[in-house]
Image (cartoon, helix red, strand yellow):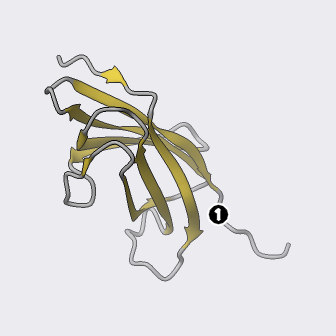
Amino acid sequence: MTSFRQLESLRVTLDKLVYMPKLETPAERPHPFAYYLTIENRSEETVTIRGRKWVVTDEKGNRIVIEGDGVVGKTPRLEPGDHFSYHSYHVVATDSVAEGAFFGSSESGEPVATLIPRFEMKIPRGPE
């Protein structure tokens, strides 16, 4: 198993979270939330992001784990001071939280990781 050094100076920020009810969703998870993230390299080393892992947990404690190579089909190479912004979406059945990490490597080949800040996806409720 690969051991990753958490690179504190590689920062992830949630720029925006939007409920998007018009997006196509599976029947069992009908609530889509688009999220907009920025990965910023504040370190002194060049880093390439090679993968990600998300854990989405609903209010009942059910978890969905999403893992894969790259970020939206890319492997961004971030030199010191560079950033990479993107958006994607999660689909949920009930109010949920998402958190995770990006994994990559430094220019010397050392495995590094940075955490994705936890965010809540609260389904808008109509007037009661």
Residue at screen point 19% across, 60% down: 73
**Vertical order, 128 against 83 (above or below):** below
Residue at screen point 44% across, 32% down: 9
Can you say which quadrant of the picture contains the N terminus?
A: top left
- The residue lying furthest to the left in this view is 109
User: Closer to the camera, 4 or 76?
Assistant: 76
User: Closer to the camera, 38 or 58?
Assistant: 38
Q: Residue 14, image x and y in percent?
A: 54, 53
Residue at screen point 20% across, 57% down: 74
Q: Residue 78, image x and y in percent?
A: 28, 47
Which residue is under mark 1?
123
User: Closer to the camera, 122 or 26?
Assistant: 122
**Vertical order, 125 against 84 (above or below):** below
Is residue 86 rendered to the left or right of residue 48? right
Residue at screen point 29% across, 33% down: 45
Is residue 105 rendered to the left or right of residue 84? left
Q: Residue 46, image x and y in percent?
A: 25, 38
Which element type, helix, strand or loop, lies under badge 1? loop
Can you say which quadrant of the picture contains the C terminus?
A: bottom right
Which image quarter: residue 17?
Answer: bottom right
- The residue lying furthest to the right in this view is 128
**Vertical order, 127 against 70 (above or below):** below
Q: Residue 23, image x and y in percent?
A: 43, 78
Is residue 1 rendered to the left or right of residue 116? left
Is residue 22 rendered to the left or right of residue 41? right
Give the amino acid type for the residue marked by disc 1 in the picture.
Ile
Task: Count every numbered label the image shows and give the total.
Answer: 1
Which image quarter: residue 43?
Answer: top left
Neighbour tally class for label 1: few under 14, some 14-19, many 20 plus, Cα within 10 Å: some
User: Closer to the camera, 40 or 111?
Assistant: 40
